[in-house]
Structure formats: structure tokens, C-alpha cells
């Protein structure tokens, strides 16, 4: 389930957008900029962030807010802007997409879906792919070279998370937070065990998807194995 965090000075303004995504099955959180750190600490990191830049002096005040967000969440970001802001200055780095207000919640939901597909390497609405490895998000089925792969629940969640964030290195602590949840009290050894089991099911002489980053953690290889 994709997680989307809405950040802005006016929560009521963001709530209709969040409700639209919640109705489509997304997990949503609406918070003030100052609450961003707390929101990230209280649960898994978001898969996407929607920022209301209309209350941050438009694109001029946006860099500081984006910097604070990047400190707590490495997620693609959509900025909500007013048309007058577009001519003020260039949009700062860190924005992956923007939407000019007024706009409907349906339109924003479509932008979020598109952004998540692009950054998660989705082939369509329900499929993650990397070379011969295919993950069907709707049916929770996994295929390798056309053959089904049977995964336990946490093995699947671990694979989905790593593949959705291909190329990003995660510490064991970060994987525990994002896959098992902040209320999990097991040790980081749990991650190593599940990585080993997952590798035994999806890797072999022709397939090496998960990379161990020494003294740091793990990442899903950014390019398909040759």
C-alpha cells in the first residue's frame, strides 16, 4: 500500500486531496511542516510527498521546506503552486512535479499515481519489473523468468519496498521501520535473515538483484542484471 504525506500550513486545505487518495486505498498523513519529523518517526517513510507551496511564499520559500522534507523522507515530491508563482522564479531542485491551483483532488490523485509509477519503475498501474523479475502489486504475485515465486508475507513486503526504491541504500534500521513498522521490537538480525531467504528464492547464477552495501545495509540494484 502506497503511503503519501501531505505537508502544508493549512491542514483543512489539504484534507480533500488526502481523502481522495485514501478512497483509492492509499495511506495518507496530513501534517504541518513542523510536524514532518514527528510524522516520519511515528511510522514508515512516505512513498510520495505533496507540499502546499502556496503558504510558503510560493516558489521563493519552497527550498527551505524541501530541504526539511529531504532531511526526513527520501521521496518524490509534488508541489502545489498558484499560477502567479510560476513567473516569479525558477522552481527549486527537489520538485518532481507540480500542480497549479485551483485543481481538483481527482487531478492530484492522477499526478500522484503517475509520479509513483515513474519512480517505482512501474510498467503499468499494478506491476513492478526488473529484468526477468515481475511483481504484480494487485495480486501480490511474483514471477521470475515467467515462473511463479512463492514468498512469505514479509519477504514480499521487503521485495516490494526495495524494488519500489531501486538504487537507494537502506540501513537495516530503515528497513525495519519501513517494512516491519515502528512498533516492531525485533533486532536488525531479522532483516539479514529475510534478505537471505529472499535471495534464495529470486537470485541465482543469472540473477543478482539485491546488493549488500558494506557497513551500511542493502539496496535493490539500480539496473537489471545482465
Image: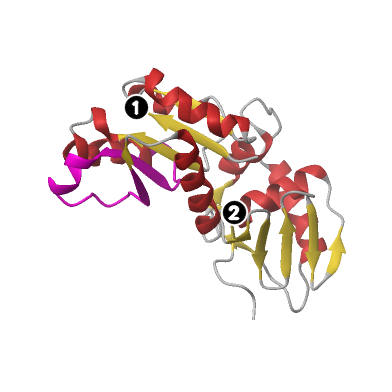
Q: Does the magenta portion include 211?
A: no
Residue at which label 1 appears: 8
User: Label 1: few (<14), some or many (≥20) within 10 Å?
Assistant: many
In the figure, residue 150 lies in which quadrant? bottom right
Q: Is residue 192 left or right of residue 12?
A: right
- Residue 181, position as x, y percentages in the image: 64, 32
The residue under the point 41% across, 26% down is: 14
- Residue 106, position as x, y percentages in the image: 50, 38
User: Label 2: few (<14), some or many (≥20) within 10 Å?
Assistant: many
Figure quadrant of the N terminus: top right
Q: Please tell me whether mark 2 sits on a helix, a strand or a loop.
A: helix
Q: Is residue 157 visible?
A: yes
The residue under the point 59% across, 54% down is: 164
> Residue 164, labelled with which disc?
2
In the figure, residue 180 lies in which quadrant? top right
- The stretch in magenta equals 71-99
Q: Please say if 8 is above or below 112.
A: above
Closest to the observer: 89 or 222?
A: 89
Amino acid at each position: 500500500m502506497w503511503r503519501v504525506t501531505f505537508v502544508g500550513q493549512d491542514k483543512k486545505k489539504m484534507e480533500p486531496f488526502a481523502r481522495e487518495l485514501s478512497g483509492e486505498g492509499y495511506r495518507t498523513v496530513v501534517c504541518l511542516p513542523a510536524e514532518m519529523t514527528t510524522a516520519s518517526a511515528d511510522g514508515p517513510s512516505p512513498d510520495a510527498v505533496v507540499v502546499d507551496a502556496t503558504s510558503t511564499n510560493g516558489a521563493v520559500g519552497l527550498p527551505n521546506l524541501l530541504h526539511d522534507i529531504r532531511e526526513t523522507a527520501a521521496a518524490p515530491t509534488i508541489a502545489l503552486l498558484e499560477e502567479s508563482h510560476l513567473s516569479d522564479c525558477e522552481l527549486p531542485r527537489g520538485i518532481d512535479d507540480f500542480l497549479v491551483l485551483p485543481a481538483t483532488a481527482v487531478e492530484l490523485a492522477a499526478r500522484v499515481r503517475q509520479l509513483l509509477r515513474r519512480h517505482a519503475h512501474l510498467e503499468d498501474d499494478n506491476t513492478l519489473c526488473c529484468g526477468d523479475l515481475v511483481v504484480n502489486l494487485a495480486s501480490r504475485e511474483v514471477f521470475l523468468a515467467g515462473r511463479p515465486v512463492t514468498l512469505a508475507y514479509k519477504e514480499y513486503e521487503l521485495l516490494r519496498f526495495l524494488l519500489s526504491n531501486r538504487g537507494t541504500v537502506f540501513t537495516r534500521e530503515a528497513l525495519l521501520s519501513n517494512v516491519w513498522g515502528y512498533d516492531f521490537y525485533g533486532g536488525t538480525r531479522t532483516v539479514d535473515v529475510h534478505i537471505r531467504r529472499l535471495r534464495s528464492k529470486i537470485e541465482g547464477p543469472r540473477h543478482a538483484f539485491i546488493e549488500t552495501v558494506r557497513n551500511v545495509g542493502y539496496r535493490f540494484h539500480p539496473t537489471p542484471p545482465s
